[in-house]
Structure formats: C-alpha cells, structure tokens
Amino acid sequence: MNIFKAIYCRTFQFCLKVALPFLPYRNPKVLNKIEDIPLNLKENSIPLIVTDKSIYSLGLLNSLEKSLSEANIKYYIFADCKPNPTIGNANDALDMYKKNNCSAIIAVGGGSSIDCAKAVGAMIAKPKKSLQKLRGILKIRKRIPDLFAIPTTAGTGSETTLACVIVDENTKYKYAINDFPLIPRYAVLDEEMTMTLPPHLVSTTGMDALTHAIEAFIGKGGNKSTRRDSLEAIKLIFDNLENSYFNKDRESRKNMLIASFKAGRAFSKAYVGYVHALAHQLGGYYNTPHGLANSIILPIVLKEYGKKIHKKLYKIALYCGLANKEASYSDAANLIINKIIEMNNKFNIPNHVELNKDDIYPMARKANVEANPLYPVPVLWDTKKLIEMYYKVGGLDE
C-alpha cells in the first residue's frame, strides 16, 4: 500500500478509536428463554418472524409460535431467507411486513436470518433509501422496529452487532451496512434452539465466532472492554466447541452462545479485519457459508501477518492456558495458529476453497474497498496483496 493511502487509513482508524467512548453503542437485553419474548413485546405488537425454510421445517419455531399464541399475539412468518440474504430477499420480507401492518421483528436463525431482519428494519427506518444507498457506516440514524434476535447457531454474533451483511444479486457484491440502530433490542440465548444443529454448522459457526474474537483482539481498534470480551470468548470457544461438536453437550452449547455474544460485542466496537473482507467476497461469488470461509481463511491470514501479531497471540495463549510466561512470542503465536488448524482438521474443514482465477482480481478489489480504511488491521494490505491472499486461500499457483 502506498504511503499516502496508509496514512489516510491509519488516521481514519485512529479517529474512530478516539470517538469510540462517545458513540451510542448499547447492549441488547439478554433473554434466556423463548418464552420470555411475549412479556417483552410492546402492547398490541404484531411481529414478523424472519427465518429460513430449514429452520421452519425442523420445527424450531414451535415453541415461539406456542408462546405467542398463548399470549394472544398475532404474528406472521417470512420463511424464505437465503443463506446469504440478498437485496431482493429483504424486499420480499419488507413487503410482508407492510402488507400485514407488523410493528416488530423476530429473527430466528443464524447470521443470515438476523441480517435479513436488520435489512428490513433499515428500510423501514429509511423508506426513501435503497439498501445500496445504506452501504457503509452511519447511514440509518433512526430507530428501527424492536428487533428480537434468536440465534440458532453460536457463531455470527449478529444478535449483538450493529452490522448487517447483504448481497447485491446483480453485482455479486456482498457488503455491510453498519449503524447503531441495527443492534437488536433483545438477544435470546436459548441453548434449546441449538440442540438440533448439524455438526458441520456447530463447527463452522463456532470458528466464525473465534474469528470475530481474534480479529477484534489483534487489530488496532477497541479498548479494554473489547479485549476482555475477546479473550473470554476465545477461551470459551477453545474449552467448549469440540464438546459441543462431538457430544452435543447442553452446557457447552450454552457456553458457545455466550462466547458468540461476547465476540459479537467485541467486534462491534473493535471491528474485524482482512479475514472477513476476503470471506465476504467468497459468499458473494460462490455462496460459500460465511463461517466456513472464515474457518479456512483465519490461519492463512494469521500466518501472513507474521511478527506484527505475535505479542497479541502470546497474550491469547497465556490467557487460555496454552503457553506459560516463559514462552517466546513466536512460539506462543504458533501454538494458537496450530490450535486453529488442529480444530479445523478435527471438524473436517478443508484447507482451501475452490476458486476461479478470473474472479480473484474483482474479489480482491471489493475486499480492499470493504476493509480499507474501516478495519483497523494489524498490517495494511492493498489489492495486490489481497490477490496474493486469494491465491493462498485457493491453494493456487500464481
């Protein structure tokens, strides 16, 4: 990256960090059970439930529908959310919301359902703006309808973040909308909703949460509270993800929900990095599930950052009990990276993503636009470097 662009990026990031204590972040109110939702809905509310066909067919809405019906609350269900929600997808949900005079939104699912619900909220708050016009940061600035986020995966952290990620199906561009009103009012951390989750989703969404926590910790943004949330989330994931994956253990599933929530809270303020910028384009071009993309890319990017992050990875290794104080920074960093690779291997996550070489340059350009200057990454990369990273992610020869 040329020196002038680098100065611009670091100045932008420094200003955001200075402004952090003064920005209107808020934490969602945490509900522990689905049955708590009716008591927290405003009187005469008509919620739109946003979910996907898989969750609906598995019967995961049964307890929610029962609770709402017993409280005599009328509701409607939009069950057509896609794995990577598109602009058209969000507009279809918005049409149902308006047609039925809804006044609240309940998102049930992983990050895709919650992102779709946030997109609906954004368009309600800004009816004269398209989702394309809302791309970036601080474009909404108005309260959205009360949003209840019920994660069925322990990974995205969307139940506590200000980010909404959407795909423009015409350009294949996957981008983020970031603003404080998108933080859900309520986060429902009910482990019962995760008990039927297939093992491959347990692993990839768990690794997604790990990526959030690590990127928030190693970047140049954030503060003491985000670093604490990141460390606590990383340790919870190292201690619980394998048990959650192999044994379907209820306590581990609950701990993973808590880890995902903490990681989401951390990266909402500290932001993420190039792992996410690279992964988002794989979602846009190939519909690669976000957690899977992050799982594969994370160790590759951490290795490439090199010595710049060794001290921070050393701190993670100390906190998680993987290294002692006498360990060198580089040895401790390698312990963390190898731990991630070992976990991926145990979960049968591949080392690479199959890529079309013709897509690499446009993906790298879009990753560059997404990441720079917003993400306070430990090392600044330009489009040329991001192209190199896509070759590594794809296991390709340049």
Image (cartoon, grey):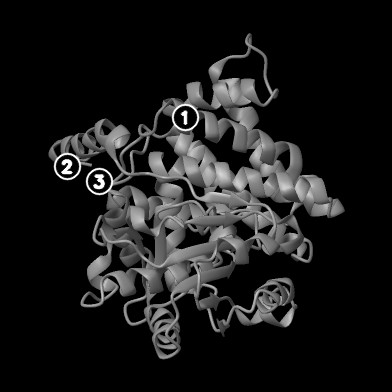
Looking at the image, which residue sits at the far left? Answer: 4
- Element on which disc 3 rests: loop
- Element on which disc 1 rests: helix
> Which numbered disc, 1 or 2, marks the residue that appears first in the sequence?
2
Res 5 label:
2
Whole-number angstrom distance, CA of label 1 to CA of label 2: 30 Å
Residue at (61, 61) in percent of width and height? 151
Q: Is residue 272 visible?
A: no
For the residue marked with disc 2, what is the amino acid? Lys
Q: Quadrant of the C terminus?
A: bottom left
Whether residue 239 is situated above or below residue 372 in the rendered picture? above
Res 225 label:
1
> Which numbered disc, 3 or 1, marks the residue that appears first in the sequence?
1
Whether residue 296 is situated above or below residue 299 in the rendered picture? below
Residue at which label 3 appears = 373
In the rendered picture of this protein, how many numbered marks are placed on residues? 3
Residue at (36, 65) in percent of width and height? 144
